[in-house]
Image (spheres, rainbow, N blue to C red):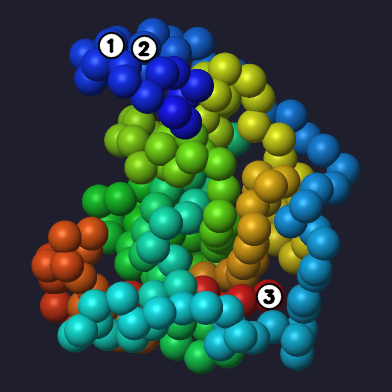
Amino acid sequence: IAMDMPADTPAKALVNEFLRRVENPIKPVLLETGPCKENILVGDKVDLLALPAPMVHAGDGGRYLCTWHLNITKDPDSEWVNWGMYRGVIHDRNKLGILAHPSQHIGQMLYQKYEARKQPMDIAIAIGMEPMCAFSATTFFPAYVSEVDMAGALRGKPVELVRCETVDLLVPTTAEIVIEGKIHPGERRDEGPFGEYTGYRAADRAPMPVVQVT
């Protein structure tokens, strides 16, 4: 349905259509504003605790606000912008813990580039986005492949983006919630465990990067 195909489309036909579409990436378009700009809170008005973040499973290491979303970060050496889905737990009113393994694209950017240069990394998190944006973010496209272009391919039309308020990144205009911030070099707080979509935990509690929400 998210790909505008009949609900009874056979799995094989769905896979073949997916493979056909990703052969033709579609660049996004930049708009001046959008629905995600209706309410803007910065500075002392930032309060993650005001957002609905549930304790998803018994035994989780905190209240996870980010479990179906986009993490948006930019490679400092190229034009590559990575869209991924890396869980986020609320630490306090303006700090969010992010799971970032060195093998993941977000980890490669953060540890090998930004932290190696002692530079903070801009990050934007979009919650409540179009299905194909989430689908693209969770598909393992290779490094330097733009997930936003692939989301356009899967939708059959460009994704509409708008500039963030406090970081140099673009986010989908129709996102319900956008969280902007910076990950500062070396800052860590314990994150996890978290029951994945099956409810089973994949790893123990461990120090992970922290987003200072702007």
Q: Amino acid at mark 2?
A: Glu
Give the percent coordinates (x, y) of residue 160. Answer: 71, 35
Q: Residue at x 46, y 24 (%)?
A: 3
In the image, 190: left or right of 154?
Answer: left
Query: Outermost residue, right direction?
Result: 32
In the image, 157: left or right of 140?
Answer: right
Nearer the camera: disc 1 or disc 3: 1
Tag count: 3
Q: Amino acid at mark 3?
A: Thr
The part of the image, by quadrant, that contains residue 202 is: bottom left
Q: Residue at x 36, y 47 (%)?
A: 105
Query: Which residue does the numbered mark 1 point to in the structure image?
Result: 13
> Which comes before the other along the chain, label 2 or label 3?
2
Nearer the camera: disc 2 or disc 3: 2
Give the percent coordinates (x, y) of residue 10. Answer: 24, 16
Reply above or below: 47 against 171. Answer: below
